[in-house]
Image (spheres, rainbow, N blue to C red):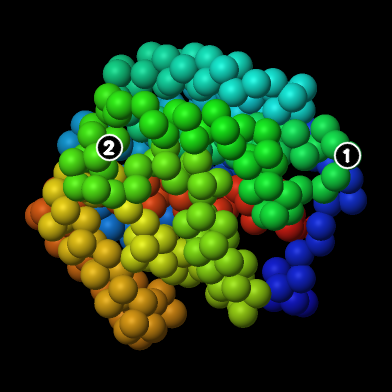
Amino acid sequence: MMAAARQKPQPWCGAPSPQTIGRAATRALYHELALCPKPGLVTLTDNGSHRDMDAQTFMRSLFALRGYFVAIAELGQQNADFAALERCGIQAEAHMLAATGGINTHRGAIFMLGLLCSAAGAVSGSGAPPSPARLRNTLRQRWGDALAARALRAPSLPGGLAAQRHGLRSASQEAALAFPVLFETAVPTLVAGLARGLSPVQARLDTLFHTMAVLDDSNLAHRGGLEGLRHAQQSARGYLAAGGATSPGGMDAAHAMGCDFQVRNLSPGGSADTLAAACWVVQLCSPAP
């Protein structure tokens, strides 16, 4: 019966509140943090390829950001312009840095999940229940022009500079396209994995690797250059071709990849943000009864 319930999640009867939207975002970021093994990334028991942060750093950041996701969902519900969303995100980043002692744990999630929460707020304000298609269409219709203009700005952060240097699609460009990897790869992979009876850990791990295989992850490019990005993508494809998380030895293979990523100083932070966003979409659009 439990497996059947997981395969047929119940939709919302009505539109979720900004508080529900924001809580789902915080919960999704925790699910991403707790996932293990997760090559190169911080988990509850492993720092991955990072020397300046651990799970406690991430938890401090999560507590600092709880109000942000609610606030930006409220802005979306109020039909705020992009400038207001951007100001809210800048304030959230300052809160994050204050909580972590200047360490960037969630800058990408502040941008990506913040935009998604604002889109969910806008959908909720219309009285409609959220769906992946409604969220993506709302991003395009409400803030698509502003996001396209933002993507033309000269990059100043390490990930954007790496994307420009190597001719990759940056996080800003991904947002301007309404997050194609999220909605066309990550969300369908997570939904399909849960529908066929995978545990949440297995489904999330396979979703992470499917995302790594196709995303122009600028964090990987920043830390390992184009060679590091391509190595991570090929490793993810090889992992999936061997059967993924449910294959015999699948977890051991993920652990071994983590050791390889540590040696190469690789951390797929953009893929982790996309996984968290996929967890949020699935929670919000198909919450458990």
On residue 159, which mark appears? 2
Q: Residues within 10 Å of mark 2 (few under 14, many from 20)?
A: many
* Percent coordinates x, y for residue 214 in the rendering: 36, 63
* Sequence-first disc among 2 and 1: 1
Tell me, for residue 56, which label it has, or none: none
**Residue 83 spot, x, y in % from top left:** 57, 17
The residue that mark 1 highlights is 127
Q: How many marks do you count on the picture?
A: 2
The relative height of residue 193 versus residue 269 in the rendered view (above or below) is: below
Classify mark 1: residues with Cα within 10 Å, few (<14), some (14-19) or many (20+): few
Q: Secondary structure at mark 2?
A: helix
Asked which quadrant contains residue 117, the reply is top right
Is 175 in front, or is 244?
Answer: 175
Alpha-carbon span between mark 2 and mark 1: 37 Å
Q: Observer-nearest residue: 97 or 134?
A: 134
Q: Quadrant of the C terminus?
A: bottom right
Rendered location of residue 145, percent (x, y): 57, 33
Quadrant into which the N terminus falls: bottom right
In the foreground, 244 or 142 = 142
Foreground pick, 62 / 107: 107
* Residue type for callout 1: Gly
